[in-house]
Image (spheres, grey):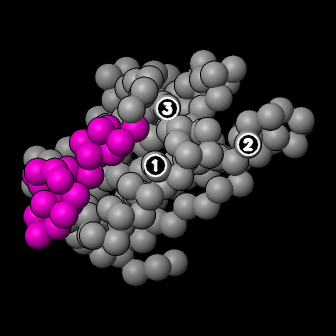
C-alpha cells in the first residue's frame, strides 16, 4: 500500500494527462460522455478513507464492465478519469466515463448499486448525480478547476481553491 499524502492542487502533469485523455477518447470515436458526481461526504466516508472507497467503487464497475465484455458485449475499453475535490471539507469526485449509447442506463444502475453497497445504504439520494456530456473539453476545465494556479493560464482557465485532498496515488488503466 502506498503512503498517504495530502495535496491542495492538481499538478500540471496530471492536468495535461487528463486533457490528453479527453482528446484521445474523442479522436478515437469514444468521447467521454457521462459525468458521475459522487459526494463522498454525504455517503458518510471520512476524508482519509474516501479515496480508497472510491477506488473500490471504480474497481467494482470495471469488473462488471470486463464481465460484460467477456459475455461478448461490444463495450470496448473502460475509458474514464476521476478528479477529487474537497471544498469546505465536502469530499466529491467527478468521474467522466465513456458509455456506449446502448449501455448508459445500465451503467447508471450499476454505479448506483455499487455506490449504495459500498456506503451501506439503500439509496444514494442527493449524493450521486449523473449528467450526459456532449463536450467533454469544457467539462474537463470545470473538473480541473483545482489546478495549480501557477499553470491555470497555461490551460486557459481559472484556478479555484478546492480544498486539500488526502489519498494514495490513484492509477487507472483501461481494460
Residue at left 24%, top 42%? Answer: 142
Residue 164 visible in rendering:
no
Which residue position holds label 1?
Answer: 22
Q: Is residue 124 above or below residue 72?
A: above
- For this orientation, the residue located farthest to the bottom is 3
The Cα–Cα distance between marks 2 and 3, rounded to whole angstroms, is 14 Å
Q: Position of residue 130 (x, y in %)?
A: 42, 25
The reply to whether the C-beta atoms of the residues labelled 2 and 3 are less than 8 Å apart is no
Instruction: Looking at the image, tell me whether mark 3 or mark 1 is earlier in sequence order.
Output: 1
Q: Which mark is residue 33?
A: 3
Q: Residue at point 60% right, 39% down?
A: 30
Mark in the foreground, 2 or 1: 1
User: In what element is the residue under mark 2?
Assistant: loop
Q: CA distance from mark 2 to mark 1?
A: 16 Å
Among the two numbered marks 2 and 1 on one chain, the one whose residue lies closer to the N terminus: 1
Picture coordinates of residue 148, whole percent (x, y): 17, 66
Horizontally, residue 57 falls left or right of residue 7, namely: right
* Position of residue 22 measured from the top left corner of the image (x, y, whole percent): 46, 49
What stretch of residues is rendered in magenta? 136-160
- Position in image of residue 2 (x %, y %): 46, 79
Neighbour tally class for label 2: few under 14, some 14-19, many 20 plus, Cα within 10 Å: some
Residue occupied by mark 2? 76
110 left or right, relative to 163: right
Residue at (42% x, 71% y) in the render: 169
Q: Earlier in the sequence, mark 2 or mark 3?
A: 3
Secondary structure state at the residue bearing disc 3? loop
Q: Verify whether residue 102 appears in magenta.
A: no
Q: CA distance from mark 3 to mark 1?
A: 10 Å
Q: Give the main secondary structure of the magenta stretch.
A: helix
Mark 3 near mark 1, Cβ–Cβ under 8 Å? no
Q: Quadrant of the C terminus?
A: bottom right
Amino acid at each position: 500500500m502506498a503512503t498517504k499524502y495530502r495535496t491542495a492542487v492538481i499538478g500540471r502533469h496530471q492536468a495535461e494527462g487528463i486533457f490528453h485523455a479527453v482528446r484521445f477518447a474523442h479522436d478515437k470515436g469514444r468521447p467521454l460522455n457521462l459525468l458521475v458526481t459522487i459526494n463522498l461526504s454525504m455517503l458518510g466516508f471520512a476524508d482519509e478513507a474516501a479515496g480508497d472507497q472510491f477506488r473500490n467503487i471504480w474497481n467494482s464497475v470495471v469488473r462488471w464492465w470486463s464481465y460484460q465484455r467477456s459475455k461478448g458485449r461490444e463495450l470496448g475499453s473502460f475509458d474514464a478519469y476521476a478528479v477529487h475535490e474537497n471544498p469546505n471539507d465536502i469530499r466529491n469526485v467527478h468521474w467522466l466515463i465513456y458509455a456506449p449509447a446502448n449501455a448508459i442506463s445500465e451503467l447508471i444502475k450499476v454505479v448506483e448499486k455499487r455506490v449504495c453497497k459500498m456506503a451501506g445504504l439503500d439509496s444514494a439520494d442527493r449524493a450521486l448525480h449523473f449528467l450526459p456530456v456532449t463536450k467533454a473539453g469544457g467539462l474537463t476545465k470545470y473538473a480541473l478547476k483545482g489546478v495549480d494556479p501557477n499553470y491555470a493560464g497555461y490551460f486557459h482557465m481559472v484556478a479555484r481553491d478546492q480544498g486539500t485532498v488526502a489519498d494514495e496515488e490513484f492509477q487507472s488503466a483501461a481494460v
